[in-house]
């Protein structure tokens, strides 16, 4: 049998985490100060005096790594749990997540990149979930009117019109309007391209003019017109674009956000260029401005999640793209200078590199592996430099590109995964903090109250063996809360074989944390050398809560 004065044995502590018991030493837990486990005392609500253990309803697998951190001083990340769960557990135990070992850091930090990706996808709103009426009212600034139920007809109609034009997947009508918008965009771009072809040109006298291209290229654009079919088709498309942008501007939740949107700015510029060209005299500069109509293709990003992901992939890969540009610029300047002097080392009457700026164009074409062939080295040193330039270009482009592809794949895979998630997740109620005392209602504690409480007077309680009842109850649970349904008097007696000075602060009957007025306290001699505490209290309110707590008694 172990001796009680064995310090090493008394230093042992039992931790029950999620039903898994762990045994260690208190000295081990004190290796990392200012943490939850370094401040264990028997006064904690997690301590069970009967089983002599501390119970925590936490993840047992993560706690195994936490306890190993106290033992070895090295914190490793378990691969069978999610990163946010591991962070939450470390935060509960009071540990710093930055203490994770370098061998596990790359695996552990993956969840942070995933959370950043999900945050970007939330901003994209690719899933297009339907907002509730309250959320729509908050978006348009009608929250107060919505709560009062005083929305006007325009305030009710405005979100519906906005959903038709800006949320293509919100309803069947919105899908039809989206299809019409895509059709008009394609027709507008097609008309813009066909207008530049000679087959669609005719003179002002409505006769086919085979030399219209010559007149137009010479600046005589006022002598040439397009076919009437293209003319009316283009006007129809621009009429739709005018109606669309006007309605979207009127019903927009925020005019500022609508105006600064790049897609809306392109649409407005293209529409204004059409009316400017229609109302004023046609000129070559106005036709150049009308190239903004081709940029309307970016409006398709509202209807294609893949295009939106591609655009944000370039934004997320800005560092890699900047690195790619830096490598290309560095290589272009270096190889343009080298090819200029390499071609001059030998006699070359057909030297194409008469200056370094001309060599910049050749280096750019070579490094991007395009190779137009308009400028080629003729000497052996120049050919050697050209080969090095081509190899350097392949390496400079090939290194950052996989990172960009990986970002796009990551965005796209997360988008596909989120589209398969259920729209409404089951809510989990937060767990209540366990209490050390046991609360017994009047209906659930009839057996105990039949021995402890009388609803009429305290005399009937004294006539019964209340002392035995209290003693048996305290053997099961040290702290008891008894709810009295009506005004009554309670008398309790606590017997024990060990004595100590009573803790009146813990034995007072309380209501909402305040000691009850009118309660009396005293001690009496039960046996020679033995003491016990008892109290009597009278309830004044209905219901009234009494807390009976035995003293911490020790042998005198």
Image: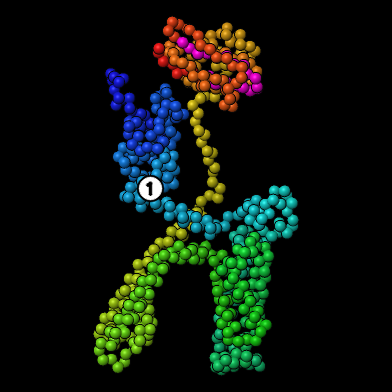
**Any magenta on residue 366?**
no
Q: Look at the image and tell me in which quarter the N terminus lies.
A: top left
Point 33% across, 47% down: residue: 101
100 over 5 or under it: above or below: below
| Horizontal side of residue 270 vs 327, given as left or right | right
Place of residue 483 in the rendered image (x, y in percent of width and height, measured from the top left):
59, 22
- Residue 13 vs residue 29, the one in the foreground: 29
Provide the residue span drawn in magenta. 531-548
Place of residue 378 in the rendered image (x, y in percent of width and height, measured from the top left):
29, 87
**Magenta portion: prevailing SS class:** strand
| Horizontal side of residue 231 vs 110, given as left or right | right
**Residue 164 seen anywhere in this rendered image of the structure:** no
Q: Look at the image and tell me in which quarter the C terminus lies.
A: top left
- Residue 446 vs residue 435, the one in the foreground: 435
| Residue sitting farthest toward the top | 528
Place of residue 548 in the rendered image (x, y in percent of width and height, measured from the top left):
53, 19
62 over 47 or under it: above or below: below
- Residue at which label 1 appears: 98
| Horizontal side of residue 224 vs 432, given as left or right | right
**Any magenta on residue 533?**
yes
Q: In which image quadrant can residue 197 be found?
A: bottom right
At mark 1, the secondary structure is: helix
Point 40% across, 61% down: residue: 406
Q: Residues within 10 Å of mark 1 (few under 14, many from 20)?
A: few
């Amino acid at each position: 049998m172990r001796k009680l004065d064995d310090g090493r044995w008394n230093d042992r502590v039992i931790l029950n985490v999620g039903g898994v018991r762990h045994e260690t030493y208190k000295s081990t837990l004190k290796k990392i100060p200012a943490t939850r486990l370094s401040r264990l005392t028997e006064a904690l609500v997690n301590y069970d005096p009967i089983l002599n253990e501390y119970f925590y309803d936490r993840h047992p697998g993560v706690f195994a790594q936490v306890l190993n951190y106290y033992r070895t001083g090295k914190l490793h990340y378990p691969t069978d749990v999610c990163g946010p769960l591991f962070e939450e557990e470390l935060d509960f135990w009071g540990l710093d997540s930055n203490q994770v070992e370098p061998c596990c850091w790359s695996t552990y930090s993956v969840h942070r990149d995933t959370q950043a990706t999900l945050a970007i996808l939330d901003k994209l709103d690719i899933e297009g979930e339907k907002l509730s009426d309250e959320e729509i009212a908050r978006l348009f600034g009608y929250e107060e009117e919505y709560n009062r139920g005083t929305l006007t007809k325009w305030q009710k109609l405005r979100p519906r019109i906005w959903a038709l034009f800006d949320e293509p997947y919100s309803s069947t009508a919105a899908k039809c309007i989206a299809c019409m918008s895509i059709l008009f965009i394609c027709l507008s771009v097609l008309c813009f391209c066909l207008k530049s072809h000679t087959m669609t040109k005719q003179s002002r006298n409505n006769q086919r003019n085979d030399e219209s291209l010559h007149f137009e290229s010479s600046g005589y654009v006022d002598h040439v017109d397009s076919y009437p079919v293209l003319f009316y088709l283009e006007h129809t498309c621009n009429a739709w674009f005018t109606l669309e942008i006007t309605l979207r501007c009127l019903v927009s939740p925020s005019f500022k956000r609508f105006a600064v949107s790049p897609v809306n700015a392109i649409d407005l510029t293209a529409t204004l260029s059409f009316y400017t060209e229609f109302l004023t005299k046609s000129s070559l500069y106005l036709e150049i401005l009308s190239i903004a109509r081709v940029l309307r293709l970016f409006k398709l990003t509202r209807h294609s999640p893949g295009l939106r992901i591609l655009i944000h992939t370039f934004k997320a890969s800005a560092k890699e793209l900047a690195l790619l540009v830096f490598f290309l610029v560095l290589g272009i300047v270096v190889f343009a200078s080298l090819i200029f002097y390499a071609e001059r080392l030998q006699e070359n009457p057909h030297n194409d590199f008469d200056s370094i700026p001309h060599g910049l164009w050749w280096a750019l074409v070579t490094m991007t592996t395009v190779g137009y062939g308009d400028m080629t080295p003729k000497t052996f040193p120049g050919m050697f430099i050209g080969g090095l330039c081509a190899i350097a270009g392949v390496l400079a482009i090939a290194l950052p590109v996989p990172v960009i592809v990986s970002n796009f794949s990551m965005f796209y895979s997360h988008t596909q995964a989120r589209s398969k998630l259920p729209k409404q997740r089951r809510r989990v109620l937060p767990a209540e903090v366990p209490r050390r005392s046991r609360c017994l209602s009047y209906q659930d504690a009839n057996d105990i109250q039949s021995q402890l409480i009388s609803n009429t007077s305290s005399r009937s309680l004294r006539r019964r063996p209340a002392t035995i009842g209290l003693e048996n109850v305290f053997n099961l649970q040290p702290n008891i809360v008894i709810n009295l349904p009506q005004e009554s008097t309670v008398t309790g007696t606590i017997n024990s074989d060990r004595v100590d000075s009573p803790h009146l602060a813990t034995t007072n009957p309380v209501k909402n944390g305040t000691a009850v007025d009118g309660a009396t306290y005293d001690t009496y001699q039960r046996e020679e050398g033995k003491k016990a505490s008892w109290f009597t209290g009278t309830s004044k309110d209905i219901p009234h809560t009494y807390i009976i707590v035995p003293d911490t008694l020790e042998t005198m």
